[in-house]
Amino acid sequence: MRSLLKRNVKLYFRDKANMLFSLLSIFIIIILYIVFLGHNWRNVMMAYLDYADVLLYSWLAAGVVAVATITTTLGAFRVIVDDRLKKIDKGFYASPVNRKSIVAAYLLSAFIVGVIMSSITFVFFSLYIIWLGGSLLSIVGHLQVLGIIMLSTLSGTAMVCFLTSMIKSSGAFTSISTIIGTLVGFLAGIYFPIGVLPESVQTVIKLFPPSYGGMLLRRVMMEDPIVQSFYGIPTEYIDEFKETMGVVYNFGDYEVTPIIGVLILLGTAVVFFGLSIWSMRKMK
């Protein structure tokens, strides 16, 4: 399994076109905010706040990192489709290695790729936020972000593996990758703050498991910028801002706690890992 794991990781980083394509939705989001959305939302949501740019891009960074945990793992799973088209997977399944180990190798390689690429994305935004006048997270904050990245990547990896196991052509994979890249950005609450969307759409976002990775990241990455920007402002305005920007999720009067967000991501990983094994066991 170790050899298969190394092979899958190397194939991802060797294929520069696939690697860049897996980051395409991230580039699009960044360009949209630099050219258009960032200026608009800053003026609408944060016009009279201190450190508004730091606050805005801390919010954006959390969402983009959450998206990266999905899109980069999806890019890493192209190897499954390629192996199927080239009949390479037949050799794997005919070998003494059981199918569970083969699926685990695909999952672990995508997980490693997702953690690496998401971490690089986080570092990039951290440097940009410092350039804007912000500050680095504490050691504890960095460890929390790393833990959330790993957890969110684990959940996203399991979901994407199940989806990819049913794709049988390179063209279908490319089309689905494009759709997912766009859809995940929306469902993670990146293009628009969650609170400005209709209630029905907010509910859909809150029922989308990967969005909890974004929520957890916002809690950590926006904590200090919120304190600085809302200094001296009544608590009720801070609570309203957090709910609008997706820093907290509320179902009526119930606020989703961080531990519930963690459990949702873990549960999603377990369920879809099982579905992935079941799906790939059906292959011949």
Image (cartoon, rainbow, N blue to C red):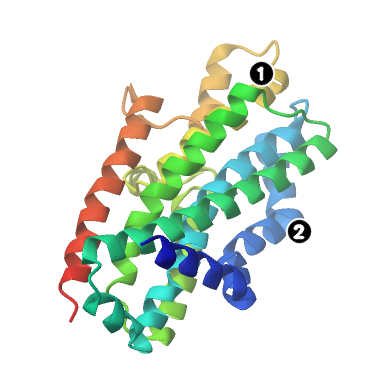
Q: Quadrant of the N terminus?
A: bottom left
Residue 35's mark? 2
Q: Which residue is mark 1?
A: 227
Q: Is residue 186 above or below residue 94?
A: above
What amino acid is at disc 2?
A: Val
Q: Nearer the viewer, residue 108 or 2?
A: 2
Q: Position of residue 284 (x, y in %)?
A: 18, 82
Q: Nearer the viewer, residue 14 or 139?
A: 14
Q: Residue at x 50, y 47 (%)?
A: 189
Q: Residue at x 50, y 42 (%)?
A: 149
Q: Are marks 1 and 2 in contact (CB under 8 Å)?
A: no
Decide if residue 229 is on the left or right side of residue 147: right
Q: Is residue 85 above or below residue 194?
A: below
Q: Earlier in the sequence, mark 1 or mark 2?
A: 2
Q: Nearer the viewer, residue 242 or 281?
A: 281
Task: Single out the mark in the foreground, 1 or 2.
Answer: 1
Q: Is residue 258 above or below residue 22?
A: above
Decide if residue 21 is on the left or right side of residue 271: right
Tell me if I can see residue 159 in this picture.
yes
Provide the secondary structure element on which disc 2 rests: helix
Q: Is residue 94 above or below residue 143?
A: below
Q: Position of residue 222 (x, y in %)?
A: 62, 29
Decide if residue 204 is on the left or right side of residue 242: left
Q: In the rendered image, which quarter is residue 122 located in? A: top right
What amino acid is at disc 1?
A: Val
